[in-house]
Amino acid sequence: MSYRRKILLLLILVSSIVIDAVSQNTNESLPGNGMAGHDFLMTGEWDHRKDVQTIFLVRDGKLFWSYEIPFKLPSGETSELGDASMRPNGNIVFSTKVGAREVTPSKKTVWNYDAPKGTEIHSIEPIGNDKTLMVINGVPAQLKVINVKTGATETELTLPTGKPGPHLQFRRVRMTPDGNFVAAHLDSGMVAEYDMKGKNIWSINVSKPWSASRLKNGNTLITATGNGTVIEVNKKGETVWEFSQKDLPSFKLY
């Protein structure tokens, strides 16, 4: 199996985000319908092969749409693609480290947020067609739910952090179906759930968690970058499923 196919198979399992070898034809086969089995959106984070970073939308196994941002901004700052999702209306919402943005399929910017000085934005999630959940890494770190139509901040919480610097505080924070928030504390070795008032109602120790999301069955899916694993844990914190280095010995998991 080729190097690219190994990466592809891994990232489909980990986060439904894959690398940009999306239209390459080979004689190798993947389970089911292969690349055509799942449409997906991905960000080419920290891909320095070009002077730009690219968001890719793949449908039916083919590159359908893309959007580029530069690494270097006129201000001298460095941008960094990270989190990205599609709204029900087809708009793409994504973070850039120096801010966050929403663009239409025609690539028109309909909402933009500049990160305040000394802060970074790596986690963003669209809620329906009108709201956006965003975490602003900083001192303190702030979780906000913003109505992008009115500009009003409807929810604002302070999240605890383990480091004073913003870069490694949070990469993914997600809203649960019941309106709580699951936060992967990258700098604190913890995944925690907070209610609408910011109270910690559940937590588990994890080695450098990058992402955490609540599944339909009530369990939580977590990527742990400290030991290169993906785990599904129940409400008791027990691991009920795991994907780790032993499951893919020929490729290094990060």
Image: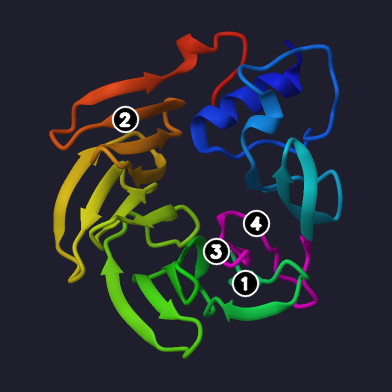
Residues packed near mark 1 inside 10 Å, few (<14), some (14 to 19) or many (20 plus): many
Q: Earlier in the sequence, mark 3 or mark 4?
A: 4
Point out residue 8 in the picture as x, y percentages from the top left corner: 66, 27
Whole-number angstrom distance, CA of label 2 to CA of label 1:
31 Å
Q: Main secondary structure of the magenta part?
A: loop
Which residue position is annotated with label 3? 87
**Quadrant in which the C terminus is drawn:** top right
Which residue position is annotated with label 4? 81
Which residue position is annotated with label 1? 102
Q: Earlier in the sequence, mark 2 or mark 4?
A: 4
Circle 3 sits in a helix, a strand or a loop, which is it?
loop
Image point 37% across, 55% down: which residue?
174
* Amino acid type, residue under disc 3 in the picture: Arg
Whole-number angstrom distance, CA of label 2 to CA of label 3:
26 Å
Label placed on residue 232: 2
Q: CB under 8 Å between callouts 2 and 3?
A: no
Of the two numbered discs 2 and 3 in the rendering, the one whose residue sits closer to the viewer:
3
Of the two numbered discs 3 and 4 in the rendering, the one whose residue sits closer to the viewer:
3
Image point 31% across, 30% down: which residue?
232
Q: CB under 8 Å between callouts 3 and 1?
A: yes
Residue 77, located in which quarter of the rendered image? bottom right
Q: CB under 8 Å between callouts 2 and 4?
A: no
Point out residue 244 in the picture as x, y percentages from the top left corner: 44, 18
Circle 1 sits in a helix, a strand or a loop, which is it?
strand
Of the two numbered discs 3 and 1 in the rendering, the one whose residue sits closer to the viewer:
3
Q: Earlier in the sequence, mark 2 or mark 1?
A: 1
Q: Earlier in the sequence, mark 2 or mark 3?
A: 3
Magenta-highlighted residues: 68-96
**In this orientation, which residue lies closer to the viewer: 62 or 98?**
62
Of the two numbered discs 1 and 4 in the rendering, the one whose residue sits closer to the viewer:
1
